[in-house]
Image (cartoon, coloured by chain):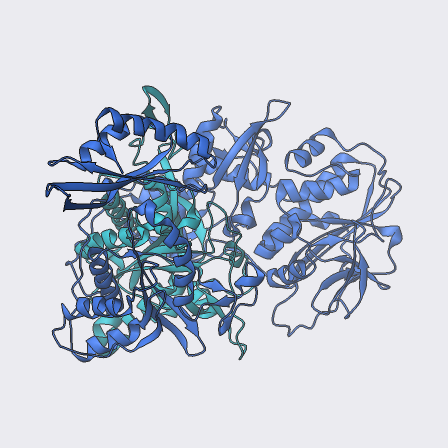
Chain colours: A cyan, B blue
Amino acid sequence: MHPVKLIINKAVQKFQELGFRVVSGPELETEWYNFDALNVPKDHPARDMQDTFWIDTKDGSRKVMRTHTSNMQIHAMEEWSAKNKKENPENFQAGKNVEPLAIICPGKVYRNEATDARHEANFYQLECLYVDEKEKVSVANLKWTIEEYYSHIFGKKIPVRLRSSYFPFVEPALEVDMGCFLCDQSGKIIKDGVEKNCSVCSGTGFVEMMGSGMVHPNTLFMCGIDPKKYAGFAFGGGIERLAMLRYNIEDIRHFYSGDIRFTNQF
Amino acid sequence: MKKYSKKWMQGFVEGNLPTDDNFILDEVSKKGFEVEGFEKSSDGDSLFEIKVLPNRIADAFSVRGMGREFAAVFNLKWGGEIPKLDLNNFKLNNDFIINQNKSNQENIPVRIFTGIKVKNFDNTIVTPGWIKDIIEKSGGRSINCLVDITNLMLFSFGQPAHVFDADKLTGKIVLRFATEGEELELLDGKKVKLSAQDFVIADESKALSLGGIKGGKASETTKNTKNCFFEMANFDPIMIRKTSQRLINRTDASKIFENGISTNKTEDALGILIATIKEIQPSCEIEFIVSNKWQEIGQNWVNTTCTDIRNFGGVNISNEEIVKLLHAQNFEVKLENDNLKVKATGERLDVNIPEDVAEEVLRLYGFDNIADKSLHLKSTTAHDPMFLLENYLRVKLFERGFTEIETYVFVDKGEVKLKAGLAEDKMFLRDNLTAGMLEAYKKNYNYLPLIEKTEVKTYEMGNVFTNNGEDRRLCVLWEDGKKKSKFAENIQSEITGILKEIYLKENFDLKDVFVSEKPACIEWSLTNILKILEEKDIAIPFLKVEQDLGDIKYKPLSIYPFIVRDIAMFVPSGFDFENLKKAILKLNLANVEKVYMFDSFTKKDEQGVEKTSIAFRIIFQSNEKTLTDVEIELEMNKVNNYLKENNFEIR
């Protein structure tokens, strides 16, 4: 089985248990869903943070190959808010007695950067989003959800550290460092009877994995959700990265080479 | 990535910064900015390499600003207050500036413009050592005293500044957009052709500099400069970004301006600059100053509540603690019961909404100190039908011996084109999966021995792109390379068989999109298949993969060719190949990739006695080089010897 799909299946097994359902969406996306709705307007320096493939559209419309699965946050939130406005308008406006939105989206994303053993022009991300009444969502919930995910994938308790960062679509933005599964955060492993620095985490005990945060009020607002009544958290990370760490895979390009020797091992 | 000097940051902090630089690295990385590393300078100072992201360029992209951040992280008192200079002591000459911008402009190109005209400055003097030190440690270099003063303002305070040789100016300073095609020679000698979107600081005869980006050669200062004009302004971020991108001229100044700084900062900078000039050369004369403000950019009061902050973090932090953490950053705080009003310091531009306030509290509190809290949702299986369909097919195809692959999306022909791609032959999006599948087959057919199989059975599920939009496809290939084999029908029956398991009906037309007979390969639209299933109200279950992720061991792929050696021989009754395999592996042959049996048959010989014959294969491959025949024969001799010693009859 393709290792990415294998990990996705395992991830879904855990997420569905936690109450998250899978959604899917387009890979060829409009600029609005990929950037503007995520609070990354044109001419904002944050646009430099991701290298984008732009489509040569015949009608001049602005389209891209999505640079992250975060476009699905917008589709899902728009749908959720439209559904609630239609079926449960008073409660939705009051911010009470509303079914929360809990979704994950595993999907392919595209980056316009040179390929090498660590970088490919496309890869998979797993996006997770939770939106609920304001007092019911917190950074503590975000932390818990990420730990549940990683612990399930690695088959043991994995702690997670969050660090201050910046992405326009979340506030605060938090970098996620995952506790090293190989050395159990000690930083050391025993190889051939000798104690060495852990090769996975370079002796630090933690591995930089992905970005996360609390959904930015501007983004909630653009999806028709009142940021004074609702809040949410989100995270999104590369799946190849997980597979490469776990199985010590030497080259990301194997994932897309169509090489049967690669996928046959999983 | 910029470097920040511990010594100079310490100068803005009361109380000592920690001596352990590793501790500093950890704490600052956790609570504020990513510290990539640090190095020791020749004078024993520590220089920290810190990444400042767009939201904090306004306040922390300077020694003073980063020092303030360090003070907050280590809970030390800030000692960097700017003594307010009474500007009434100086002659104000705002007539010196002609602002040619229309007042009804959407984006005001210059928010504030300050300047100082200095007479009789001896620019031959050596720049004071402390200024050189700050400049060099921040990544700049000393040029002449006047220019160094501007760089001091940039690196130490975060306010870009420029100095013109006043004797090279014609008339007054004019703030305007360039005329289309207007030429300007920059300080580095580069001649640029400007457009009507580029903003310049000019005099009454020509453009002098690219406002907020780079100075021009014509008015540059030299050792001989006696009279000069300092300029410090504040420009519209979008305008600066567009110009610096177009002219491919990115400087520290343009980086600061494209993220934006507060007008408060520029106003404070004027006082600091005057004080600095006077300190360096008390004999020079400040003829006049200019200070014009057309727009205020800064921080305002933000209203929130302590309860909101507690809920947001999911943490039980007291009102007093919240106020303490905000005071640590010198924010103004008004607490009334639960209600909190917060105003960030004048140089910040990132604290505008309640969530920003919550972040400032929680990051200093420490995100690590937030214990995780579980959600209590009901489990669900209401997944996207396309995902369920694919997953179903995937698990079933896996059970039936098919291997999933993924191939490239960017190809050399198709209907949808990219504006810019990674290579000439990768400018289009694929409009089918078959081409990639057939291409992969060529390699995969040769790899069959390595996976111990005789047939290539692969599939891919992915998106293709046409003028009609995006479509999700399934492509299945089944081929053994033998001339007479025809697997196309087998593929059809595999897929219909899998689908029949969830929908019991005889024939339904899956409407394949492409069929290749040789190699046998069929492509379907999953969108169509899903439609058929949805019309019949089929609920697709989510199939779980049972395999434990921990049981998989991956072996890196070798780029070197592999060599196959087959042996056929008679074996006695009761023969178990596994025993022979173990024995061969025990021989410790070099570079053995695989050992497996691929054929066995039993037949009666002339005497009517049943004889079993097997054929097995040894594959050699190295991860480091191409193996030679000589090396292989050496290993094969060991095998042959073993077989002879054990009385196996080789055929």
x and y percent of residue B221 in the render?
83, 46
- Is B352 on the left or on the right of B179, as rendered? left
x and y percent of residue B193 in the render?
77, 63
Please identify the quadrant where the N terminus of chain B is shown: top right
Above or below for B248 versus B388: above
The reply to whether residue B286 is in sight is yes
| Pick the front one: B527 or B160 | B527
| Pick the front one: B437 or B537 | B437
| Pick the front one: B315 or A26 | A26
- Is B105 on the left or on the right of B141, as rendered? left
x and y percent of residue B311 in the render?
27, 52
Asked where in the image residue B486 lies, by quadrant, the reply is bottom left
- Farthest residue, direction front: B606
Asked where in the image residue B259 lies, by quadrant, the reply is bottom right
Q: Residue at x 74, y 35 (%)?
A: B279
Please identify the quadrant where the C terminus of chain B is shown: top left
The reply to whether residue A97 is in sight is no
Asked where in the image residue B301 lies, by quadrant, the reply is bottom left
Q: Residue at x 28, y 76 (%)?
A: B528
